[in-house]
Image (cartoon, rainbow, N blue to C red):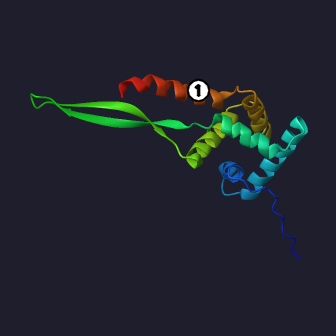
């Protein structure tokens, strides 16, 4: 008799499935769910609160509202010479796109850490982001500073 492996239960939310989908390596969704459940247990033990709210609040803190897009401006001078200028222009992001960017930043910054396994790396990065520190938070601040610098060109 074959025994089927039970899928771990993860509460449905807008952010949690995106996070789980980003953790998938080589199509192994069950392994990604196990990693996420162990991470949720660590967060519950640390904060004594619902870990879904902690992850969602961390992702809301680091998600960007605006991003930059490259624009190519072509001009025609009076002497029929063409000049091309490349400018970065800010634009608003949708909520879904900003969530996916925040999750991408979270996972990439966690991968660069020196802890032993992925669960510990994500846990340490979430603890830093909970106190408005960490690499992903710095990425958001750096993006906003470049948006403010490029604001004068428009």
Q: Kindly give the residue lying farthest to the left in the view shown.
A: 79
Q: Kindly give the residue lying farthest to the bottom in the view shown.
A: 1
Q: Could you tell me which quadrant the N terminus lies in?
A: bottom right
Residue at the image point whose x is 75% and y is 31% from the top: 130
Residue at the image point whose x is 78% and y is 31% from the top: 127
Q: Nearer the viewer, residue 23 or 41?
A: 41
Q: Is residue 12 above or below residue 35?
A: below
Q: Is residue 142 above or below residue 4?
A: above
Q: Is residue 34 rendered to the left or right of residue 94?
A: right
Question: Dot 1 surroundings within 10 Å: few (below 14), some, or many (20 or more)?
Answer: some
Q: Could you tell me which quadrant the C terminus lies in?
A: top left
Residue 100 in percent (x, y) is at 60, 46
Residue 29 in percent (x, y) is at 72, 57
Q: Where does label 1 land, which residue? A: 141
**Quadrant of residue 49 within the rendered picture:** top right
Residue at the image point whose x is 72% and y is 50% from the top: 16
Instruction: Count how many numbered circles sit on residues in the image.
Output: 1
Residue 116 in percent (x, y) is at 79, 35
Residue at the image point whose x is 79% and y is 55% from the top: 10
Q: Is residue 67 rendered to the left or right of residue 44?
A: left
């Amino acid at each position: 008799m074959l025994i089927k492996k039970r899928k771990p239960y993860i509460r449905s939310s807008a952010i949690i499935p995106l996070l789980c989908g980003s953790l998938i390596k080589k199509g192994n969704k069950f392994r990604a769910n196990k990693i996420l459940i162990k991470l949720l247990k660590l967060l519950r033990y640390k904060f004594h609160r619902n870990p879904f709210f902690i992850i969602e609040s961390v992702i809301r803190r680091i998600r960007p509202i605006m991003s930059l897009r490259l624009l190519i401006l072509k001009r025609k001078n009076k002497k029929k010479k063409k000049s091309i200028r490349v400018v970065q222009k800010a634009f608003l992001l949708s909520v879904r796109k900003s969530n996916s960017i925040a999750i991408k930043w979270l996972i990439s910054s966690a991968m660069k850490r020196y802890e032993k396994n992925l669960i510990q790396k994500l846990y340490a990065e979430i603890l830093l982001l909970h106190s408005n520190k960490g690499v992903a938070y710095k990425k958001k601040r750096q993006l906003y500073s470049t948006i403010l610098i490029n604001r004068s060109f428009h």
